[in-house]
Image (cartoon, grey):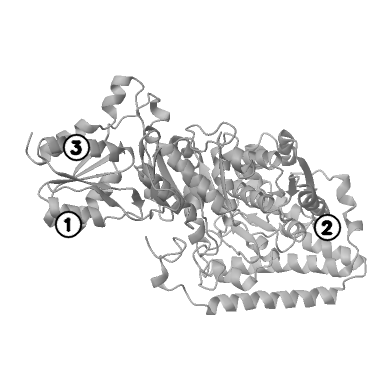
Amino acid sequence: MAVLAMRDALNQALREEMKRDESVFLLGEDIGLYDGSFKVTRGLMKEFGEKRVLDTPIAEEIIIGTAIGAAMSGLRPVAEMMTVNFIMVAMDQVVNAAAHIRYMFGGGTKVPLVIRTPGGGGHQLGAQHSHSHENWFAHVPGLKVVAPGTPADAKGMLKSAIRDDNPVMFIENEGTYAVKGEVPDGEHLVPLDKNEVKRAGDDITICAHSRMLIVAMDAASELEKEGISAEIVDMRALRPLDMAPVIESVKKTSRLITVEEGWRSYGVGSEIASRVYEEAFDYLDAPVARIGAAEVPAPYNKRLEKIAFPGKADVVVTAKALLGKN
Amino acid sequence: MKVEQRPADSKSKEAFTDKASLLNLYREMLLIRRFEEKTAEMYQAAKIGGFCHLNIGEEATIVGTISALRPTDYVYSTYREHGHAIAKGIDPRAVMAELFGKETGTSHGRGGSMHLFSADRRFYGGYAIVGQALPIACGSAYAINYKGTDDVVMSSFGDGATNIGAFHESLNVAKLWHLPIVFVCVNNLYGMGTAVNRASAVTEIWKKACAYDMTSERVDGMDVLAVRRITDQLVAQAREEHEPSLLECVTYRYRGHSMSDPDTYRGKDEIKEWQTRDPILSLGEHMKKQKMLTNEEIERIDEEITAQVEDAVKFAEESPEPDPKDLYRDVYAGEGAA
């Protein structure tokens, strides 16, 4: 067990899978010679060569399209989209093609493809580089969507995603690449369809994924000082959405907060809340509270940006309000 | 629209002299013609639903290109692909069954007219978003290079697709990465109801490859021998030199864009004029002149093929519908519903 930054845990997963399976190759913008915008692919072109680490033009549609065709023809591509905002240019390939090909061709082929892409804001990058869109993909049958929040899960889920026979949207976060944590060496696989309790508690349940998992864990520590015991459920598996640990937790705490970095409307929290109302309505003592980004295009100004994205204080205040302790 | 004839086209008839090859091309084109005529009839009888786009008139382009391929070569096509699927070797029964939405269809009734597929025949699908399949076809070509086999990819699309970004992105990487791919533009002069000169700044589509320093050719898409002759060269170039190319086949669809097209944007005289250059009649006349075919033989072949198409319809009629319990099958590989 080593302590690794998130980006190095991802790098380790890629390296191990490329060594294990010749059919795994990487493609994307500046992932090779440049070592990747966020250095996740550092050193891999040097180690595996230009055929298996393919630098592409800045042309998102051809990146995803090439990956799909290669996947249908026996390879296991891992495509990097520099940020999730750029994938909009290639949405036809992701949704109309990758997600639907297997079904519309009657199961005659499969698309074992991983699309790695970071979302998230907080770096003063403005309205075209800062958003989170995992809910868009999680809406689509045929895609799997995961968004790990710890280095160990990042490694284990990326390895599982590469071995999966379906298109997997692997959502990273620009704000977590430097976050460190213990990562098991070698063969460490985390399933793509299992959410889990990351911190046990009794008074209130908080669901969060990706960078918001870290925010929620921080909030839980602060709440503990005030005598509030929060249970944190990591929603790393968004599609298929594993609700079991959430339902179980709500049955215990009777209160639920969802936290996501994207906009609340039609969001991840909306889906979680609906399912809790359907499956555990009688256990709730208060309406589900959803926390998300302010419904504006991300602003550049530092002060405005800070209030546009959710933080620890939002979670703490909301938790206390739900428990009537403000 | 008049099509300029290129000197190379006139030599095409010298290239193929053996009767067996010519007969195969003739039969294949006639099969597609009769299949599509029957498809129109079945659509009007409400046996076929959704959108339905016919290949009638384009047979020489389809057969001339696809007959140049090996069974292990890949073909990607569009929503107007019944003929391409048959030419790549898919049983017409399975194609008709798919149009009928039956479980025995190429895509088990999940795809329909626009989404035929066969992994065995390496017919890698009909795609219903204009220009979408070109980048995917590049992926298959990348995989060929990656694995070091000598297969070739043929990516077929209409003139309308050449105005889309995906077309240009695909030609760019095909040249950049030395992909073994032949891009075939079926220029039938209309993108739905919009004539090519109302949609494209450059109406001679082959010229668009110049931007990527890529081999490109324009051929009379009504002359199966001309199409085949040039395709042989381009396929060999892809297979042996890993050099991509763009082939523009100028052809015409006799019917509307789809079965629901009233065809008000072009004159009846234009359609009649193109029909005088019918690819099947032309090849038949050529073979008769060469004493390779008689009127009696032509009639007999037509009867055989008509019977084959009737058999495909019978098969489709008698095949089972998909079972409702299988609605969720194949949304994901390796598991049930999610």
Q: Residues within 10 Å of mark 1 (few under 14, many from 20)?
A: some
Give the residue displayed 12% in from the left and 57% down from the top: A282
Q: Is residue A321 above or below residue B261?
A: above
Q: List x then y, in percent, for residue A284.
A: 12, 51
At mark 1, the secondary structure is: helix
Q: Are marks 2 and 3 in contact (CB under 8 Å)?
A: no
Circle 3 or circle 1, nearest the eye: 3
Mark 1 — residue? A280
Pick the residue in front: B252 or B93.
B93
Which quadrant is home to the N terminus of chain B?
top right
Give x and y (percent) for residue A199.
Answer: 22, 46
From where the camera sits, is residue A276 visible? yes
- Identity, as a three-letter code, of the amino acid under mark 1: Ala
Which is more toward the observer, B157 or B40? B157
* Chain identity of mark 2: B
User: What amino acid type is highlighted by mark number 2?
Assistant: Leu
Quarter placement of the C terminus of chain B: bottom left
What is the x, y in percent for residue B260?
Answer: 54, 57
Q: Residue at x 80, y 52 (%)?
A: B236
Label 2: how many Cα within 10 Å (few below 14, some 14–19, many 20+):
many
Identify whether B46 is placed above or below B78: below
Q: CA distance from mark 1 to mark 2?
A: 70 Å
Q: Is residue B195 left or right of residue A178?
A: right
**Towards the viewer: B8 or A78:** A78
Q: Is residue B284 left or right of residue A191?
A: right
Q: Nearer the viewer, mark 2 or mark 3?
A: 3
Left or right, A113 with reference to A234: right
Q: Which residue is mark 2?
A: B225
Picture coordinates of residue B31, whole percent (x, y): 71, 69
Query: What residue sits right under mark 3 in the picture?
Result: A221
Disc 3/disc 1 C-alpha distance (Å)? 27 Å
